[in-house]
Image: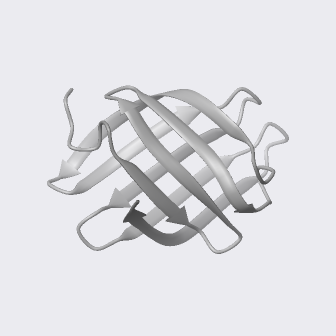
Amino acid sequence: MNNNLSGKSFLADLGAFRSELFFELNDVLLFRIVEGGGPGEQGHTERVNITIAEVRPGVYMVAWKEATGATVTHIEDHENGILYSNATLPDGSFYTMKGTIRPL
C-alpha cells in the first residue's frame, strides 16, 4: 500500500527516549535512537520491515519486529503530532508510551 510517509523523516519523542524515523519505502523504516535509553541504547540504528495501515488520513498504525526480537506498534497521528507506542521486549516486558511526533 502506498502511503504519505515514504521518503519522509520524523522525530519521535517518547519522554524516556527520542528517535528519528525515516520511512525509506512503503515497507521499510530506518530508526535511530538519538537520546535516552530504555528499550534501546542511544545511537542504535536499525533498518526494519514494517507494516502500515492507514487508520484515517494522517493517522497510521505502524508495526515492526527488531533484530533483538522486540516488537513495536505505533499509532502515529501526524495531523495532531501525537504518538502512541507499544513495545514488547524479548524478556516479555511490555512498555506503553505516549509522546509526540514531528517532521524533520
Residue at the (46%, 71%) spot, across then down:
100
The quadrant of the image that shows the C terminus is bottom left
The image quadrant of residue 36 is bottom right
Against 69, is 5 above or below? below
Residue at the (37%, 57%) spot, across then down:
76
Residue at the (71%, 54%) spot, across then down:
94
Q: Residue furthest right?
A: 91
Q: Nearer the viewer, residue 85 or 42?
A: 42
Against 92, is 57 above or below? below
Residue 80 in percent (x, y) is at 28, 74
Against 104, is 82 above or below? below
**Number of numbered discs overlaid on the protein picture:** 0
Residue 5 in percent (x, y) is at 29, 43
Residue at the (68%, 38%) spot, across then down:
45
* Residue 8 relative to residue 88: left or right: left
Q: Nearer the viewer, residue 27 or 102?
A: 102
Q: Nearer the viewer, residue 4 or 65?
A: 4
Q: Residue furthest front?
A: 104
The image quadrant of residue 82 is bottom left
Q: Nearer the viewer, residue 26 or 20?
A: 20
The quadrant of the image that shows the N terminus is top left
Residue 4 in percent (x, y) is at 21, 43
* Residue 70 relative to residue 50: left or right: right
> What colouring method underlies this structural image?
one colour
Q: Residue furthest left?
A: 57
* Residue 18 relative to residue 21: left or right: right
